[in-house]
Image: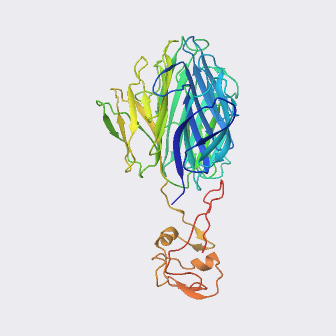
Amino acid sequence: MADIKIARGTFSTPGSTGNFNVTGLGFDDCEFVFCHATQVTSNDSNTAAVGHMMGITDMTNDRCCVHASSDTVHNTLRRAVNDAFIRGVNGDSDTPDYIATMVGAITDGFQLNFSSVAGGSGFIVHYFAVGGADANAVVGTQSFGAGSVTGVGFTSDLVGCISVCSANENVDEQYSFMSLGFAHDNGSSIDQWVAAIYGSDGTGSGTGDNKHSLLVDGTFIRQLGAEYTAWNAVCTVIGTDGFTWTGGNADDVYYFCLDLAGTGVYVDTVAKETGAAPDTQTLPDFGFTPQAMLLASCSELSGAAETADNNCRFSVGSYDGSAQGCSITTELNSSNTEQWQRSMNDRAIALSDDLGTAVDAEGTVQSFTDSTPDIIWDPNNSEADLIGFVGFTSQGTPFVEQGTAGAVSVTGFVAALDLGFVAAGTLGNAAVTGFVSALSLGLDVSGTLGNVAVTGFAGEVDVSKPFPYHIIKQKRRDMRAMLTL
């Protein structure tokens, strides 16, 4: 079984600068953290203006995307950050409330270093952490005019991107672009979706204070603009050392690649159920029982290309089998007085469709018991909003590829190891002709392995016990396996 662990939770930002520990993950070897936050200090109530942030880190490389929208004047902002993991921005003043970098993994969690807490303390940050002995992650920056990312060092089970659609880093810019996308190779095609938003500040291109948002199936990165779609990028290949795409432009995108040892990942979208609350919605078959989910929505119905300004809404959340939570923002088109944000610590996703300050639909993911998870919508509305989600599991086999040991075919190797030895000295019923000599065990007592004469076998292995093997992790190498007797 692969060692993959996932935990989600929240923490409140401190009131002083310096190192700050986030604990309670349940594991020590954290490899990747995705975070998101709105600038609120309490759950389940609206705060005026929008300061929305998403960050990613592989514990060494930090990236962060910020967008902000004032509730008092026509003013929006975006910022791509390559020197911090989290940066919370006040939506009215455009000044940072807090800034922190990742220090690294610690016992039961991770450590951050806060260089600024100018806005005070207590801002709620949601995190989704991945670790375990078999997990690897790479975070980086790429111009999406390049067409590919290489040098990852492994085959990614999941690729993701965050972006504010800018070629400039660490500077504030007009307009509030932001997008979040995921892609996964299911063996026959690339499953992918993206959630994207746009907000003008009433100057420059576009008219008034136009705002809109969209979640699109089959696209990896999407920049929205005054013309509704500035550019798209579609992931076409996830290879052994990176990934490729078609489309895009010269804007920088922050990407992350996750190696989850071949365990289950499922990427899909679904239209929200519209029945009276509480309405139970069963998701499509993942093919495995998940241990965690990420979800996002833009409160849009079909995912079709925008042709009008339909307000800007964004929600992202997660569930790890025991805890769930989300952040939500709403920005009304042609208005400077209906911009608000919220954090929820008991819902995995929340949607706002009306032209007001209400949360119209709240989704609670139910305990994972099989491969078709349920979401209960309560409250609910009649809008069939498109929801994007990613499912994760730790289930998997220690070694799944067929190959050769020396010049000898070892097709069926995993199944044979799973069966273990029997008293007669056979290895299950798998064909293992030449197996031992190919591995050059070099033992000095005679025995048999299945129907193969083996020098040095019987005296060195207790055939009454299962075959002793394990997988040794070597950081950022694909298929790091060692067989030991």
76 vs 238: above or below: above
Q: Is residue 201 left or right of residue 313?
A: right
On the question of residue 467 being in view, the answer is: yes
- At 56% from the left and 25% from the top, the residue drawn is 39
Q: Quadrant of the C terminus?
A: bottom right
186 vs 73: above or below: below
Q: Nearer the viewer, residue 180 or 227?
A: 180
Q: Residue 47, position in %: x, y?
A: 51, 20
- At 62% from the left and 53% from the top, the residue drawn is 154
Q: Is residue 359 left or right of residue 212?
A: left
On the question of residue 295 being in view, the answer is: no
Q: Is residue 351 left or right of residue 435?
A: left
Q: What is the tally of numbered marks visible in this picture?
A: 0
Q: Nearer the viewer, residue 115 or 446?
A: 115
Task: List the single residue furthest toward the bottom.
Answer: 446
426 vs 63: above or below: below
Task: List the single residue furthest toward the front.
Answer: 15
- At 63% from the left and 34% from the top, the residue drawn is 253
33 vs 463: above or below: above
Image quarter of residue 358: top left
**Colour treatment of the image:** rainbow
Q: Residue 75, position in %: x, y?
A: 59, 14
- At 54% from the left and 53% from the top, the residue drawn is 4
Q: Nearer the viewer, residue 4 or 261?
A: 4
Q: Residue 211, position in %: x, y?
A: 51, 18
Q: Residue 395, position in %: x, y?
A: 47, 56
